[in-house]
Amino acid sequence: MINFNVPPFTGKEMEYMKEAVENQKICGDGSFTKKCNEWIEKQTGTTKCLLTTSCTHATELAALLADIKEGDEVILPSYTFVSTADAFVLRGAKVVFVDIRPDTMNIDENLIEEAITERTKVIAPVHYAGVGCEMDKIMEIAKKHHLMVVEDAAQGIMASYKGKALGTFGEFGCFSFHETKNFSMGEGGALLIRDEKYIEQAEIFREKGTDRSKYYRGQVDKYRWQNYGSSYLPSDMNAAYLYAQLELAEEITKVRMERWKEYWEQLTSLAEEGRIELPYIPEYCTHNAHMFYIKTKDMEERTRLIDFLKEKGILSVFHYVPLHSAPAGIRFGRFSGEDKYTTKESERLLRLPMFYKLTADEVEYITEQIKAFYR
Ligand SMILES: *Cc1c(COP(=O)(O)O)cnc(C)c1O
């Protein structure tokens, strides 16, 4: 059986976790957390990185920092994971969904302006499959209308748009290190902060509303309750696990890219015959092979293909059910304009197995079965 996902494991995780335990600092912000933060700052070029307990929590921090209040509006795609919406809805915001582009499955940058009202505060683009949204245009719109940008870059580590790392364009960027992502710590994430002015408040929100981060650095002689906040810092044991993977990030990405290209090459003939569609990567986007998907004719064909592959021992899965048609989406949001592609394209998309330990032989077997299905 070829699984859809196998969490990455490189070999050094246990050693580093043992080290974290022996350091007798297994709570948050120990030495491995620092190493991860510094690694991400260096790799992405962001001003400040704070490791968090999840990407969902990183987005909640961003919503707190953006000072989202009851009745504010946040613009995002409907084709995304619930967390992009949840983080803002928790602060009382209304989520305004904008249609996606059928080629990249990212928010259609040309439809954002129509969705802006006087209550709009944030644009939250999602870099689907680690392929960058049109950030030049999005940042231009944000500047013109004085909006903040929170990037859901959960799938976007090690990927870039015009040479700049995803997650570093907006005021805030959010990474995920969930076990289904390219690098993992079980559950975890990171908040990327672009402007220095937000760092102090971010540390306070993340540390239960206290200035404990300053205290740890010896900048104050006691820490006190400064503001509302929550607990968003992960255990150093989890950070140790992640650090083992970040050290091998280049290698992991290289291997994933090889598998991605094999899928692409072996399925090109079917795409040329018009039987399926392959992902589109704009030439100025460097992706990270987070995902390999194909698009079938429609949902009915996709269901048959999933069943067929399952019989052949291959687990393939579909992805997001659009948020605007889900119960909470109806309650907390509205769709701006016409749903031309969100529902239609989401019903055609099928994700194929993609993980670090996937072999070239397995990719070949999978693509052969897909070809057999269409024959
Ligand atoms: C995985 C994912 C999240 C959530 O990440 P967690 O770390 O599980 O909170 C949010 N948005 C997108 C687009 C994701 O793929």
Image (tube, rainbow, N blue to C red):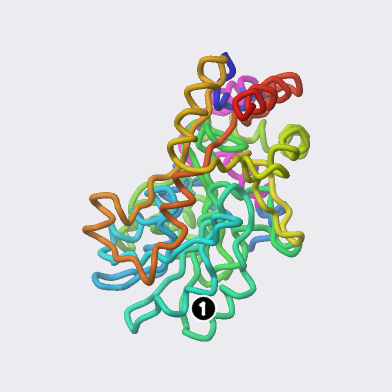
* Residue 280 image offset from top left, x and y in percent: 67, 52
Question: As rendered, which of 165 and 213 lies closer to the eye?
Answer: 165
Kind of residue at disc 1: Ala
Q: Residue at x 28, y 50 (%)?
A: 326
Question: As rendered, which of 196 and 292 lies closer to the eye?
Answer: 292
Rendered position, 356 above or below 46: above
Main SS of the magenta part reads helix
Work out whether residue 222 can be spotted: no
Q: Quadrant of residue 337?
A: bottom left
Rendered position, 154 above or below 183: below
Magenta stretch: includes residue 35: yes
* Residue 33 image offset from top left, x and y in percent: 57, 41
Question: As rendered, which of 278 and 32 lies closer to the eye?
Answer: 278
Q: Secondary structure at mark 1?
A: helix
Report whether 196 appears left or right of 257. left
Q: How many marks?
A: 1
Quadrant position of the C terminus in the picture: top right
**Residue where numbered disc 1 is placed:** 142
Q: Quadrant of residue 373?
A: top right
Q: Residue at x 57, y 70 (%)?
A: 195
Magenta residues span 14-40
Magenta stretch: includes residue 36: yes
